[in-house]
Amino acid sequence: MAKDGKAKPVKSTQKAPVAEKKESQDVSLPGHDHAAHAPGDCATAVNPGSIGHDDPETRGDSLTKFEAELNKREVDLIEREIKSLRQQEELDRLRPLSGLYRVVRAMASERRLDSLLDVITRETQVMLRCDRCSVFVLDAQAAELWTQVAMGLVGHRMIRIPITGNSIVAECARTARMINIPDAYQDPRFDPAVDRNTGYQTSSVLCVPMLARGGEVIGVFQVLNKQNGPFTNEDEDWLEGLTAVAAGLIEQAQAYGEIERFVDKTLETLAQTIDQRDPLTAGHSIRVTNYSLLVGQAMNVPDDDIDVLRYSAMMHDYGKIGVPEKILWKDGRLTPEEYATVQKHASITYDLLSNLPFTRRLKDVPFVASCHHEKVDGSGYYRGLKGDDIPFLSRIIAVADVFDALTSVRHYRNRMPIEKVAEIMNNGRDNHFDSSCVDAFFQLPCHRVIAVLESERDRAANFDAEVFKQLSWQRLVELVSGANPKRGEEGINEAFDRIYNAGLPADYQSLD
Ligand SMILES: [Fe+2]
């Protein structure tokens, strides 16, 4: 026994180096001071008293048992370590798979491109154990690559890289080949100015080109700074797979965007064909759409419903195509028969729009559009719906439609003074209009309402938005109606008058 009372480690040349130290510290035979002997001399130098008897054979047996016990424990330990290493390897092997699972799951439940790319880059960071991931999308017209997503870049601003420039990303896009660089500073294609600008220290770089189905490059997936060494062949394989997924999603989103723009422009053009039959109603559908969107956004209408609102508002008067021009353009008041003919436009709108193959998301457009003349007290047309039976989006369009009609020049009158418009809207609360939609309209920022109000006039809207930025439309109406201007509101009344009545013939008579 050692002087301090603790057993000293057994030194054995036969033991595995990994297990030796630890195992030797906690293994001892009862009463056998094996630590006092040199390796291999147990059989001859053991203290007989410590074993309890002097029989050399028995002593030999004890030592053999001791050796066997040592070996067994060391083997156990080695096995445990091997198992732990295998578990770690298994975890390393599963990490990419579980990341891929999360990507696939996100693809099944999310359709917004930004969110999907966000998931892909986040999982790539974990799977490849790297520091940064960026998805560059090619803008062929501008001949630039721009960052759709840049994970790990604090205070990210969009990065734009010219396709012809000297950079690894541009080279990857130009050649459509993967680039794997262990040390960027040793590579002539790397531009250290990027690091100088961002304060980042690039080391390893892996870039994979994103290809469309036709094989053309649509972007580049770049990952930076692999932990513990350069990117491996396995990393290349994983990133190629993930890049293919990202490329597919981007291509799909771009195609979807093109279709949406086409539908949007087609419907806008159809709406304008109606508006432009009469120069005085030109721009009505667009303005009603823009007012409706302002109110819808202010009332937190969900994104999908905002699209229904946009197309319904745009097409609300499309049925006017079925109303003779001599009635539509008539100066002065309509006869009851003529008015009945005009009213038919709402049902014609429904019939015509119902023939269009709107997607499931937009299937309510014909109904919403055709309800814009319904009134909450049930006295509207053409179905005579009441209260909540009128789609909420139609109630928004109703407010926007009347506001635009009253603030536009007509054949028989000038723009109506806005205090009178406000009076009509307020009088229409809970009989014509849904009061909450009127409230939301009055609370709109004044400069936004003016921007729409003036958007389609011959002279481009050229007003100092700053003056009106602090006001709601409600407050402007109050000021125009004679309220005392508070500090900062001086001159607003006059400024608005110059905008609203600019270029209008003064001799128009109001019939309202
Ligand atoms: Fe209408």
Image: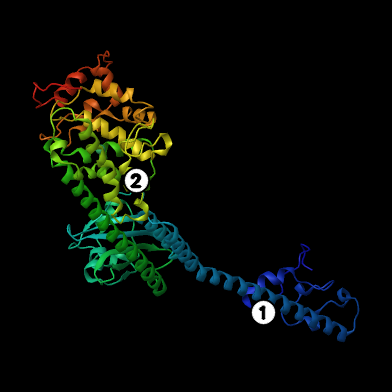
Q: Residue at x 38, y 62 (%)?
A: 225
**Rendering quarter of residue 190:** bottom left
The answer to whether one can see residue 426 in this image is yes
Badge 2 residue CB within 8 Å of ligand 1:
no
Please state, as top left, top right, bottom left or bottom right, where the C terminus lies in the image: top left
Q: Earlier in the sequence, mark 1 or mark 2?
A: 1
Q: Amino acid at mark 1?
A: Lys
* Mark 1 surroundings: few (<14), some (14-19) or many (≥20) residues within 10 A: some
User: x%, y% of residue 12?
Assistant: 69, 79
**Rendering quarter of residue 123:** bottom left
Q: Which numbered mark, 1 or 2, is in the foreground of this view?
A: 2
Disc ID at residue 243: none
Please state, as top left, top right, bottom left or bottom right, where the N terminus lies in the image: bottom right
Find the distance from the CA under tag 1 to the CA under tag 2.
85 Å
Circle 1 residue: 15
Q: Residue at x 38, y 67 (%)?
A: 242
Residue 37 is left or right of residue 231, and the answer is right
Q: Marks 1 and 2: CB-CB under 8 Å? A: no
Q: How is the image coloured?
A: rainbow
Q: Secondary structure at mark 1?
A: loop
Q: Amino acid at mark 2?
A: Phe
Q: Residue at x 87, y 84 (%)?
A: 58
User: x%, y% of residue 188?
Assistant: 23, 67
Residue 200 or residue 301, whichever sits in front = 301
Q: Residue at x 39, y 74 (%)?
A: 233
Circle 2 residue: 367
* Mark 2 surroundings: few (<14), some (14-19) or many (≥20) residues within 10 A: many
User: x%, y% of residue 464?
Assistant: 18, 29
* Image quarter where ligand 1 lies: top left
Name the residue furthest bottom.
Answer: 57
Residue 39 or residue 22, whichever sits in front = 22
